[in-house]
Image: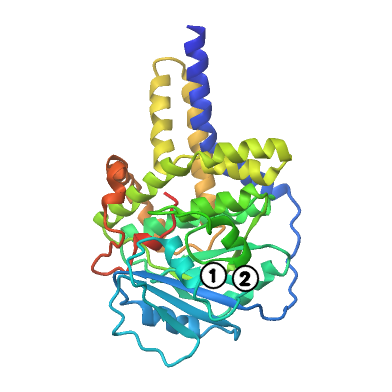
Amino acid sequence: MAVINAIWILFQVLIGYNLILPILLYLLYSVKKHKELLMSAPAEADYAIIVTAYEWVTAIPEVVNSLLKLNYSNYLIYVVADKCDISSLHFDDERVIILRPEETLAGNVRSHFYAINRFKRAHERLTIIDSDNLVEPEYLNELNKLFNLGFEAVQGIREAKNLDTTYACLDAARDIYYHFYDGKILFSVGSSATLAGSGMAFTTQLYRSCLEHLDVSGAGFDKVLQAGILSQNKRIAFTGKAIVWDEKTTHSDQLVKQRARWINTWFKYFGYGFTLLLKSVKNFSLNQFLFGLILLRPPLFIFLILAVLCMLVNVFISWFGVALWLVGFLLFVLGFYLALAKSDTDKRIYQSLVNIPKFIYFQIISLVRSRKANQYSVATRGAQSTETDQTKPEQP
């Protein structure tokens, strides 16, 4: 009986710490002194901007036009049009290079290296942009500020391009939560920002060293990439000023397919967290330790459901346990509210929060379908969305 009780308590701790981890990180962030970023303007590093498209190129002209308006001169744009009809793509600017693979690649990393192996010159840095993204004119200049401090990997922020449906607003709320805790806070306390699939930049040398020897298929390349960077105990910097405008999920069927792939990815790659925790002990590394905890964290809706089940079980076992779970839920809600309150959150996002139960319901369906997630088409798009699972972040 004692063994069973010990296992039950351990299980609750492993689930429950996810509820309070955000607020603990915020408290650590609040008491930590933050250094101001150097505001010097270094010489323009040479960037390769890689835009990957799969099966469709409808939004590519808008994406490229956005990139051509950057307040920057030293860059080339590589559009990898995988399994696409490129007859409609015509750009007069010599900075735009259209690449059409002879054979279908069907993968982010394969598309990236298809471009890298065809670089017109030896670019010092590369940045990855989705085929539905728009960028702010200062995007590369803001990335440079972090690179100028010695970082080799930088994650920008993905703002919502569309808030026209409830699903889009809830998707944006989720992004705000993750950008705040897994981006700004995690980086500020001495660890690394998680990668978001696009709006991220690396030295070309670092990117190649992490992925060139691997053939990463399906979703999840950002999981493999960030694990490779952290295994070297390098930090991924975060900046909320390098802004990428991202298309949000607008339809329930789109949401289910997308989340099924993301959930499948978490189960496939969460073991990297154990590896980093072991490395953190060996290296006495706060960077690797905190990041390892984040990688082990289940998707948001999964640990919330498990937490509710634990509280319900405690109704029949221990009212003290129920009280602890209630405190945990209150701290989680407080942490979620802080993420929205400390960010520039549109009022439509606040209004959409009443639909969170419906959002969770569709994610439960996604969980059921996650085992067959890789059978879904890589490109899933709705009538009003240009979303591709190939290039979306793998963060459920």
Q: Quadrant of residue 348?
A: bottom left
Residue 355 in the image: above or below residue 380: above
Q: Earlier in the sequence, mark 1 or mark 2?
A: 1
Horizontal side of residue 158 vs 256, given as left or right: right
Pick the front one: 24 or 195? 195
Pick the front one: 336 or 42? 42
CB within 8 Å, label 1 to label 2: yes
Residue 336 is situated, as x and y percent measured from the top left of the image, at 50, 48
Label 2 neighbour load within 10 Å: few <14, some 14-19, many 20+? many
Horizontal side of residue 51 vs 25, given as left or right: left
Q: Which residue is mark 1?
A: 127
Q: What type is the residue that disc 2 sits on?
A: Leu
Q: CA distance from mark 1 to mark 2?
A: 9 Å
Residue 237 in the image: above or below residue 311: below
Q: Quadrant of residue 298?
A: top left
Q: Which residue is mark 2?
A: 143
Residue 83 is situated, as x and y percent measured from the top left of the image, at 30, 70
Horizontal side of residue 307 vs 373, given as left or right: right
Q: What type is the residue that disc 1 sits on?
A: Thr
Residue 391 in the image: above or below residue 277: below
Give the residue displayed 67% in from the left and 47% down from the top. Answer: 287
Pick the front one: 40 or 181? 40
Residue 56 is situated, as x and y percent measured from the top left of the image, at 29, 72
Q: Tell me, what colour scheme is on the image?
A: rainbow
Whether residue 164 can be seen here:
yes
Kind of element beneath mark 2: helix
Kind of element beneath mark 1: strand
Give the residue displayed 58% in from the left and 84% down from the top. Answer: 71
